[in-house]
């Protein structure tokens, strides 16, 4: 991929992927950065000439160490995944798990929140910011270093792109205009890392690590959109980044407050520690980079124990059901599994069995279930039963780690769970739109 000014090549970029669709290397103007991952897909290394960083994590995805060019920095946490220390920095929290203080050798940064957990002020050494929001949690105004901005968006939601802010006007993900036109150039790993003038000359550059921490810069960067700027990430004078509903610290790879919808196993970690292959524009949900047509088909065997009271005789009946369940989902959207989980078709099942009543075995009537609900009526008796037995949410199944499009599942309804036993096919790699 080339960036040109007329016939002059300003930059050449290339990539390599492994079989798990993970970017293993990026080459910009002959300089190659190599990336390593663990079995969970978490980034473990980023290596190029003059820069070598390695990461380790605990079982819940908390970063335990970051080693840059041989210099290690350790991290500690409490039992609720709140980060207590990161190298020489110490962190304090309020009762809601929100970061309210970052104590560093150079001074303390303080964050203030409103009742909706929105950051309304950030103060610290050389930092003075205030922020205002609308009823949808969208930031509509900010004052940073005495400079006031009022954001006008193409809509009112947090991910609707900014069109102007009182200082400049924007073509989202493309350019900024204030006196002249500055066009963003993207290397491909989410971020805008170069700005060109109206005649195509490079006026400013930035180099980020995979998590968005700025490593170096040249020229004067215009506007708040840099790392993942095309996804709406906004950089503040504090060095923090606003991702929709929450603030993110790229130096630690963590949000400063818990995920309000509690997505995933760790409510502070950014993009499940997979910054090269995913993004989080609204601060609520990880979105895999790329695009695909996706489908899932699940077949399972059900076994369930039930207890029923016959209202005519008040006999207690114990029944066991066995049967077949199935479910199909198809969707199109961004990411590894797209939006398959939207408008899903719940698994349905039919089952039959036997009940013990008064010492005799009697056949049970065929029962029908739709999603988590079951309905049945015993043969030879009065009364009916309806039960609710939530299974493992297919939305959760598809959103998580794997990419099966056809699988065989065994569901034991007694334990309200589903186990994916066999993956028959895996989704082929689609084009990467990054």
Image (cartoon, helix red, strand yellow):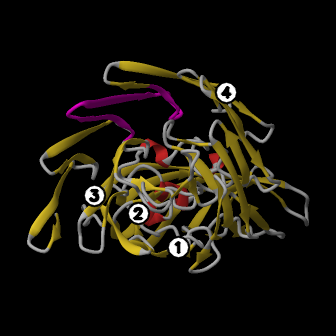
Q: Give the image location of residue 350, x and y in percent.
A: 57, 68
Q: Nearer the viewer, mark 4 or mark 2?
A: 4
Q: Which mark is residue 187?
A: 3
First in sequence: mark 3 or mark 1?
1
Tell me the element at label 4.
loop
First in sequence: mark 4 or mark 2?
4
Magenta segment: does it hold 52?
yes
* Local crowd size for mark 1, using a 10 Å CA cut-off: few (<14), some (14–19), many (≥20): many
Q: Nearer the viewer, mark 3 or mark 4?
A: 3
Which residue lies under the disc numbered 4?
A: 79
Tell me the element at label 1.
loop
The boundaries of the magenta stretch are 41-65
Which residue lies under the disc numbered 1?
A: 161
Q: Give the image location of residue 292, x and y in percent.
A: 33, 69
- The answer to whether the residue labelled 2 contacts the one labelled 1, judged by CB atoms less than 8 Å apart, is no
Real-space Cα separation, disc 1 to disc 4, in angstroms:
37 Å
Which residue lies under the disc numbered 2?
A: 337
* Local crowd size for mark 2, using a 10 Å CA cut-off: few (<14), some (14–19), many (≥20): many
């Amino acid at each position: 991929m080339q960036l040109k000014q007329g016939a002059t090549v300003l930059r050449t970029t290339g990539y390599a992927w492994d079989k798990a669709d993970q970017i293993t290397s990026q080459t910009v103007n002959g300089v190659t950065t190599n990336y390593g991952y663990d079995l969970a897909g978490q980034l473990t290394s980023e290596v190029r000439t003059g820069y070598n960083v390695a990461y380790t994590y605990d079982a819940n995805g908390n970063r335990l160490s970051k080693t840059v060019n041989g210099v290690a920095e350790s991290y500690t946490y409490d039992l609720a995944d709140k980060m207590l220390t990161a190298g020489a920095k110490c962190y304090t929290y309020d009762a809601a798990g929100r970061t309210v203080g970052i104590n560093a050798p150079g001074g303390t940064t303080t964050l203030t929140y409103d009742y909706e957990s929105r950051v309304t002020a950030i103060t610290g050494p050389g930092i003075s910011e205030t922020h205002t929001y609308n009823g949808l949690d969208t930031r509509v105004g900010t004052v940073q270093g005495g400079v006031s901005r009022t954001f006008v968006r193409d809509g009112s939601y947090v991910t609707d792109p900014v069109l102007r802010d009182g200082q400049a006007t924007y073509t989202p993900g493309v350019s900024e205009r204030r006196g002249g036109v500055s066009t963003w150039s993207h290397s491909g790993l989410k971020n805008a890392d170069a700005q060109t003038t109206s005649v195509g000359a490079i006026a400013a550059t930035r180099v980020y690590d995979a998590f968005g921490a700025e490593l170096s810069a040249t020229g004067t960067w215009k506007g708040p959109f840099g790392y993942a700027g095309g996804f709406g990430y906004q950089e503040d004078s504090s060095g923090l980044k606003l991702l929709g509903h929450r603030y993110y610290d790229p130096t630690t790879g963590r949000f400063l407050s818990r995920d309000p919808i509690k997505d995933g196993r760790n409510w502070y970690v950014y993009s499940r520690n997979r910054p090269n292959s995913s993004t989080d524009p609204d601060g609520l949900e990880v979105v895999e980079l790329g695009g695909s047509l996706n489908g899932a088909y699940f077949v399972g065997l059900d076994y369930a124990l039930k207890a029923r009271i016959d209202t005519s005789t008040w006999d207690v009946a114990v029944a066991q059901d066995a049967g077949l369940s199935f479910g199909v989902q198809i969707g199109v959207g961004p990411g590894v599994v797209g939006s398959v989980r939207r408008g899903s078709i719940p698994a349905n099942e039919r089952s039959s069995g036997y009940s013990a009543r008064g010492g005799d075995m009697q056949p049970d009537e065929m029962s029908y279930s739709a999603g988590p609900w079951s309905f049945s009526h015993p043969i030879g008796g009065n009364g009916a039963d309806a039960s609710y037995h939530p299974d493992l949410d297919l939305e959760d199944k598809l959103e998580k780690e794997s990419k099966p499009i056809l699988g065989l599942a065994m569901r034991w309804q007694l334990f309200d769970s589903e186990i994916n036993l066999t993956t028959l096919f895996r989704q082929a790699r689609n084009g990467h739109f990054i």
